[in-house]
């Protein structure tokens, strides 16, 4: 299994440009989510999905769109990039393991985005 | 809002036990305590979780107070590779939606 993959690893955008951050998982997990992490800060939830066709907002959704057409993919779209969106973006997939009574979450390696 | 309070940083000598505290005084009866760590800006890594009993796995031990208002993550023999930011998180029962809220964590520095 590749786990959670994210592309690109690095990206530089100019203010006003749009782009899509890709996230894919091959573990057949129902839940997927996007976080951003600013320097010296914890992770903040942007959007999440509890299954194909279902998405919802997290703490900081403004300026971002998501869709979930398949179980495997959960792209994050920046509509009009702003310098405040300079951050590291992490995608995660997760599932509930009733046998272990645990909620198991796996993170991708991150995308480092700079908006100038 | 994060529901937990952690010290911003701690130091630990290599080979000694690292005890990382977490305060979660508003925890609800159905909320679990989870610990993750993040090494050098990689994606966070799950360590351990618990509800009310103490837990141990190959990575760490988790001690939860009887009133569940605080917990301590114990790395029994810290190594340099344990240098990381450690996040204590409370989340609702297993079958809730994916709202895992991270705070700012504790930056643990293990020194030789």
Image (cartoon, coloured by chain):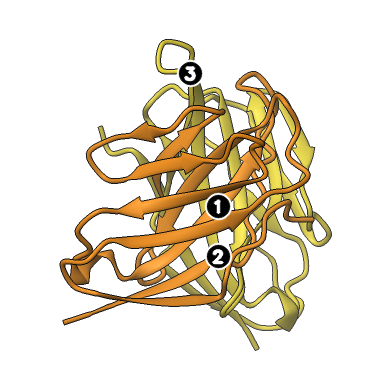
Chain colours: A yellow, B orange
Gap between marks 2 and 1 measured at Cα: 7 Å
Gap between marks 1 and 3 measured at Cα: 18 Å
Question: What's the chain of the residue with tag 2?
Answer: B
Which residue is at 55% across, 23% downward? A30
Drawn side of residue A86 relative to residue A2, left or right = right
Disc marking residue B105: 2
Which of the 4 quarters of the picture holds residue B30? Answer: top right
Disc marking residue A101: 3
Gap between marks 3 and 2 measured at Cα: 24 Å
Which of the 4 quarters of the picture holds residue B105? Answer: bottom right
Q: Where B79 sits versus B9, above or below?
A: above
Instruction: Find out whether the residues at labels 2 and 1 contact each other: C-beta distance under 8 Å.
Output: yes
Residue beneath disc 1: B88
Residue in the foreground of this view, choosing between B47 and A60: B47
Judging from the image, what secondary structure is the residue with disc 3 in?
Answer: loop
Residue reaching furthest to the right: A62
Q: Residue A18 in the image: x percent, y percent?
A: 69, 66
């Amino acid at each position: 299994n590749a786990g959670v993959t994210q592309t690109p690893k690095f990206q530089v955008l100019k203010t006003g440009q749009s782009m899509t951050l890709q996230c894919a998982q091959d573990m057949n997990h129902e839940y997927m989510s996007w976080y951003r992490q600013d320097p010296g800060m914890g992770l903040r939830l942007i959007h999440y999905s509890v299954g194909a066709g279902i998405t919802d907002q997290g703490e900081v959704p403004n300026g971002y769109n998501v869709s979930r057409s398949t179980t495997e993919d959960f792209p994050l779209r920046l509509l009009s990039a702003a310098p405040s969106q300079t951050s590291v973006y992490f995608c995660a997939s997760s599932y509930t393991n009733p046998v272990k009574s645990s909620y198991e979450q796996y993170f991708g390696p991150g995308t480092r985005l700079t908006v100038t | 809002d994060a529901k937990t309070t952690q010290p911003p940083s701690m130091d630990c000598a290599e080979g000694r036990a690292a005890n990382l505290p977490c305060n979660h005084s508003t925890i609800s009866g159905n909320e679990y305590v989870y610990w993750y760590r993040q090494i050098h800006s990689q994606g966070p890594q799950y360590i351990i979780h618990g509800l009310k009993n103490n837990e141990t796995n190959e990575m760490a031990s988790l001690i939860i107070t009887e009133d569940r208002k605080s917990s301590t993550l114990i790395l029994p023999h810290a190594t340099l590779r344990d240098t990381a930011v450690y996040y204590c998180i409370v989340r609702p029962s297993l079958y809730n939606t994916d709202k895992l809220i991270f705070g700012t964590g504790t930056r643990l520095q293990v020194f030789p």
